[in-house]
Each structure stands twice: as C-alpha cells, then as structure tokens.
Image: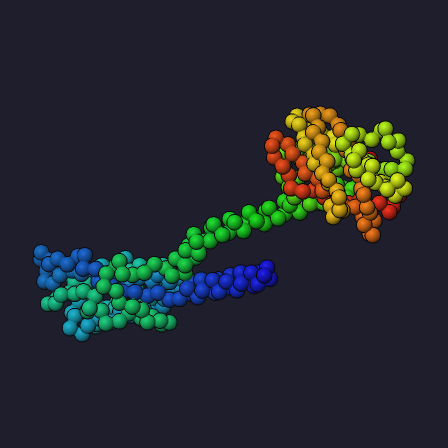
C-alpha cells in the first residue's frame, strides 16, 4: 500500500508540474477597446477612443498586428510605447514584452469604436483573442496556476514536512536509545516522548534487569510475600525468577506492573516506587520456552499516565552478566 501511495504521489507531482510548465509557456495576447475616452474633441472632428493590447504571457511577442474594421478611419493620438504605427486599418507594434500592456488613443472619424471593430490581434508566434472589456482579460495562466497550487498545497506540504521531521526525530531518538535496546528493552515508542524519559539519560531506563535466580539456590524465607504463591508452584530444581530494580529518579511516584508474556499461569506484579527511591521486583517464571527466551511486559505509570507496554527479553540459556 505504501508503494502505491508513493507511486501515486510521484505521478501527481509530475502531472501538476507539467501542467504548470505548459501554462507558464502558453501565449496570452489580447486586445480590447474599453471606450473610456469616448468624447468628441472641442476643436477637431472625431472622437477619441482607447485601445488596449495586452501580453499576459511569459514570452515576448514580436511583430504584433491589430487589424481594425475597414470602415474605421483613425489616427494614433498617443501611446505609452514608441514604435507603434498605423498602416491603413492595421496597427503594428514591433515588440510587446511579457506581462506588458500597451495603451493607444485613437481619433476615429465618422464612426463609433468598440471591441467589435477589432477584427484580429496576432504576433509572429500566435493569434490572440479579442475581449469586450478589460475585466474579460484573464490573469497570467502560469502564475495563477502556481499560486493556486501553492495555496492548496500549503496544508499537505506542512503535514508532509511535519511527518518527515517526526520521522527523522524518531530515528535519531531511536539511535540515542540504542544502549537501552542492547539491554533487551523493546517497544519504546511510548517511553520516548513521555515525561518519565526526561529524568533519565539515553543509556538509562527506569527498570534495570539485575539477574536470574534459581529456586534451588534461594532461601524460601527471603522470598517476599507477593510471589510466595508462585514460588510454591515452581519446580524445585528448574524453577527460576527474574530480578529487576526500579529506580525512580523523578519527583513523582512511579507505578510499575509486570508479567511474563506467553507463559501459562503468569500473574501480574505491581510495585509503587516513591520519588527518588529504588525498589526491587521479582518475576517468577513457571516454565521456560524452548527458545530459552523469556519476555516480560512492563506497564509504567507516572502522574496517572500509563505508557504503552514495554517489552524486555531475557535469554535464560546464557550466563547472566548484569548490566552496569
């Protein structure tokens, strides 16, 4: 599923980027007559009209020609660009740069003038479009699409960056806790971001495995009252128990619950450790799996917050070397 999601994301990125590139290079040449200056001259015949030729694209348009209706008799009164000439019914402009707008004032004799009197607008590379008014001239397609993609992509991009940042942070923190994993502790995701973690270094864990005990080598009188029932059910020769030390380095009480995983008859054990103190915990093991590995699940609580189950693996078949 993840591979399909990555492929879909890649295809989407390629399609969107290709669309933006196509829109960016599309030519946008327009002409319109807004009729903003339709007013008779006080001392000359004819009326003055405005003609606008607009290049909204991202390429320079060369040899632009605006063809007017043959019935129009006009002269160029003023323009905001040099090099504009009127040859009969055709207005010629040498060059219009990208995103540039050319304004002409035409004195028209004996006829009204509006966008319907513009027959065509073209350049060396494209045929433009006649618009009825300035508001009908569209924005730059490429920039509009780019802005739209950016605006619509801010939230997904922010989410993706947050995911990447979280992934990198997690991997770095996992590397930092490598020493704890080497001691047999797994499933540390809940511990990584907890308040409990703040009181311990990267090489420490609140619970420390201190060794394996054999029932035959232990004085029954030294067994705490909690495990007494399990102690009596253990085999006298092969019975064993796991010793742990809980070191509460925080300013709050820490509760620890533990039980062997996948072993019939196992019961949970609980210890409540006062702030800045240590307690021992004994976990009896009734039977040893064929692999020799015993897994113990721990639930840790601080300030009424329970962490996810954290697992500790013990190889009972090897000689125990206590961690420092």
Dividing the picture into quarters, in which one does residue 272 lie? top right
Instruction: Say which residue appears at 17% left-offset and 57% top-offset.
Output: 37
Question: How many marks do you count on the picture?
Answer: 0
Can residue 107 be spotted in the picture? yes
Residue 206's spot in the image, x, y percent?
A: 72, 34
Establish if 267 lies above or below 22: above
Question: Residue 15 vs residue 224: left or right?
Answer: left
Can residue 10 be spotted in the picture? no
Question: Residue 72 vs residue 95: left or right?
Answer: left
Residue 69's spot in the image, x, y percent?
A: 19, 72
Instruction: Say which residue appears at 55% left-offset and 49% top-offset.
Output: 161
Q: Nearer the viewer, residue 236 or 203?
A: 236
Instruction: Say which residue appears at 50% left-offset and 62% top-offset.
Output: 12
Q: Residue furthest bottom?
A: 70
What's the colour scheme? rainbow
Establish if 44 lies above or below 302: below
Residue 239's spot in the image, x, y percent?
A: 85, 41
Rendered-image quadrant of the C terminus? top right
Dividing the picture into quarters, in which one does residue 54 lie? bottom left
Instruction: Say which residue appears at 9% left-offset and 57% top-offset.
Output: 43
Question: Residue 170 vs residue 15: left or right?
Answer: right
Q: Nearer the viewer, residue 15 or 287?
A: 287
Rendered-image quadrant of the N terminus? bottom right
Q: Nearer the viewer, residue 204 or 127?
A: 204
């Amino acid at each position: 599923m993840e591979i399909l999601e990555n492929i879909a994301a890649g295809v989407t990125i390629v399609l969107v980027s290709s669309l933006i590139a196509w829109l960016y290079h599309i030519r946008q040449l327009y002409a319109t007559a807004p009729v903003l200056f339709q007013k008779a001259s006080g001392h000359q015949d004819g009326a003055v009209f405005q003609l606008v030729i607009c290049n909204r694209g991202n390429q320079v348009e060369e040899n632009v020609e605006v063809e007017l209706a043959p019935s129009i008799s006009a002269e160029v009164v003023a323009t905001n660009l040099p090099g504009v000439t009127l040859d009969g019914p055709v207005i010629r402009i040498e060059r219009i740069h990208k995103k540039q707008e050319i304004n002409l004032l035409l004195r028209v004799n004996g006829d009204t003038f509006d966008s319907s009197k513009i027959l065509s607008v073209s350049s060396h590379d494209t045929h433009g479009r006649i618009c009825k008014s300035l508001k009908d001239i569209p924005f730059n397609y490429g920039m509009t699409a780019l802005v739209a993609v950016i605006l619509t992509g801010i939230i997904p991009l922010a989410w993706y960056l947050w995911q990447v940042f979280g992934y990198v942070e997690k991997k770095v923190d996992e590397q930092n806790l490598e020493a704890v994993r080497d001691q047999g502790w797994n499933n540390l995701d809940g511990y990584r971001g907890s308040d409990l973690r703040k009181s311990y270094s990267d090489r420490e864990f609140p619970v420390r495995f201190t060794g394996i005990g054999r029932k035959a080598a232990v004085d029954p009188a030294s067994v705490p009252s909690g495990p007494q029932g399990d102690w009596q059910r253990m085999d006298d020769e092969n019975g064993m128990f796991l010793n742990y030390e809980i070191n509460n380095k925080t300013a709050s009480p820490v509760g620890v619950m533990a039980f062997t995983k996948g072993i019939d008859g196992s019961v949970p054990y609980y210890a409540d450790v006062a702030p800045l103190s240590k307690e021992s915990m004994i976990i009896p093991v009734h039977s040893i799996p064929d692999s020799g590995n015993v897994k113990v699940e721990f639930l840790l609580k601080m300030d009424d917050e329970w962490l996810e189950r954290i697992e500790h693996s013990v190889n009972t078949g090897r000689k125990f070397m206590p961690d420092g």
